[in-house]
Image: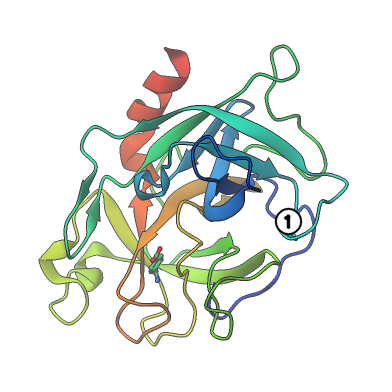
Amino acid sequence: IFGGRKSLPGAHPWQVSLQTRPKGSSQPFSHICGGILIESCWVLTAAHCIEREMQVVLGGVDIEKDEEYDQVIPVERAMVHEDYKETPFALYNDIAMLQLRVTDKPFCAKESRFVKTACLPSQPFPSGTECVISGWGATETQRFGSSQLLDARVLLISQERCKAPNVYGDSLDDSMFCAGNMNGGVDSCQGDSGGPLVCERNGTHHVIGVVSWGDGCGKKNKPGVYTNVHRFIDWIAYHIIS
Ligand code: 4AZ
């Protein structure tokens, strides 16, 4: 996160650290991406984050320390969107769902002061809305990421403005949207991918975006690009119900 500040414990209780290690190895897991808890056994993340062997950590703010409220849960399976596509300029339909291992009969993640689900959006939010991004990704001074969870406020940017030739032009499609600050400085970055962009309405937090890509981090006229969760509501519901 560029232009962020340290998150307080419990401020982003749906925030997940998605971790991996080489398949079949006994090395420790390390952070690769963020994720978003949407049901006790379901996490939303970016398709480009998926690896073979993964676990999620919930409830923590410091990923280098074992904290009292951490919940560590193996990923049972990952579903990548059928239309996910990577080109040199953009990531399309960059969304995936992780099904967690059932640890405590009907539950995977257990709700606590530090672990809660985020709601899916029932309607899109208008451009100009102030929302929040969070993650352990790169900062202005930490190119390998922050051990502390950071957050920042960003503004939703219209498709029209983000499709301008000096911004992202035709690389942008309706599976994604831009958010940040056109002057730069406040943005998500590498290691924040898969994590949440959350907007509040009537005291309820809705996951509007999944951190996906961008041209660098914090650059003028190059805001962060987020998967447009509202466009994938039916796809998400289908996987949870099946
Ligand atoms: C990345 O490399 C990445 N500024 C994530 C977010 C952004 C850029 C790059 C947005 O994962």
- Residue 202 visible in the snapshot: no
Residue 206, compared with residue 176, is above or below; it is above
Nearer the observer, 102 or 52: 52
Nearer the observer, 72 or 36: 72
Residue 138 in the figure: left or right of residue 176: right
- For label 1, the SS is loop
For image coordinates 64% across by 37% down, the residue present is 117
Query: Toward which corner of the image does residue 132 lie, by quadrant?
Result: bottom right
Nearer the observer, 235 or 136: 136
Q: Specify how the rendered protein is coloured.
A: rainbow
**Percent x, y of residue 138:** 53, 73
Query: Toward which corner of the image does residue 152 lie, by quadrant?
Result: bottom right
For image coordinates 17% across by 82% down, the residue present is 166
Residue 183 in the figure: left or right of residue 143: left
**Percent x, y of residue 176:** 29, 54
- Look at mark 1 in the image and give the residue it sits on: 11
Quarter of the figure with the N terminus: bottom right
Q: Amino acid at mark 1?
A: Ala
For image coordinates 61% across by 76% down, the residue present is 4
Category of crowding for the residue at label 1, using alpha-carbon neighbours closer than 10 angstroms: few (below 14), some (14–19), many (at least 20): some
**Percent x, y of residue 115:** 74, 40
- Residue 158 visible in the snapshot: yes
Quarter of the figure with the C terminus: top left
Residue 63, compared with residue 151, is above or below; it is above
